Image (cartoon, helix red, strand yellow):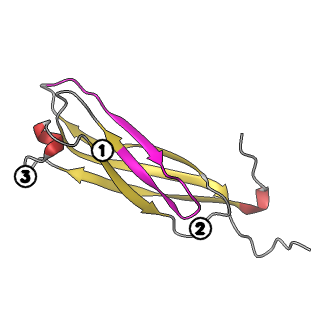
Amino acid sequence: MKKLNSHRIGVDSGTAHVFSDFADNGEMWSAEGKRSRSVKIAFSEPFLTPPTVQVGFAMWDISSTTNSRVDISAEDIDETGFSVVFRTWGDTKVARMRANWMAIGEVENDEVWDV
């Protein structure tokens, strides 16, 4: 469990447009080739230590003719950002995907003095 000083809690959040492969029959839609995408996200300001990051689907447009196999995660988390990683496999066809994310961690606070 990560314990945070209550005077230094910071929350950052946003939306990541991970891909749109439908219009050009890209790899995610054609179900061939590389079946993962990664998007680097920069926090609006740095955290003091790597924060806890949660990601979830904001929108996914997926074919109803194949099985739905999807995985989304936050990877490579550090004080300045992280990567949203989307993966699929098998015959799954995904046209496009957007993710929401939220990071919670310790930040600088000008009112807290280390004496």
- Disc 1 to disc 2, C-alpha distance: 27 Å
Q: Residue at x 13, y 38 (%)?
A: 32
**As rendered, which of 83 and 11 lies closer to the eye?**
83
Q: Are marks 2 and 3 in contact (CB under 8 Å)?
A: no
Left or right of 11 on screen, residue 54: left
Q: Which mark is residue 46?
A: 2
Residue at left offset 25%, top offset 27%: 68
Amino acid type, residue under disc 1 in the picture: Met
The secondary element bearing badge 1 is classed as strand
| Three-letter code, disc 3 | Asp
> With respect to residue 89, does 45 lie above or below?
below
Farthest residue in the left direction? 24
Q: Residue at 36% of width from left, 35% of height from top?
A: 71
CA gap between label 2 and label 3 equals 37 Å
Query: Relative to the observer, which residue lies in front, 110 or 87?
Result: 87
Q: Position of residue 66 (x, y in %)?
A: 16, 25
Task: Indicate yes or no whether the magenta region holds residue 71.
Answer: yes
Q: According to the image, label 3 marks what residue?
A: 24
Q: Which mark is residue 59?
A: 1
Mark 1 is surrounded, within 10 Å at the Cα level, by few (under 14), some (14 to 19) or many (20 or more) other residues, namely few
Magenta extent? 66-85
Q: Using a 10 Å C-alpha cutoff, classify the residue at mark 3 as few (fewer than 14 neighbours), some (14 to 19) or many (20 or more).
A: few
Instruction: Judge left or right: residue 15 versus residue 34.
Output: right
Quarter of the rendering containing residue 33 = top left
Between marks 3 and 1 in the image, the one whose residue lies nearer the viewer: 3
**Looking at the image, which residue is at 53% across and 53% down?**
77
Whether 26 is drawn above or below 8: the answer is above
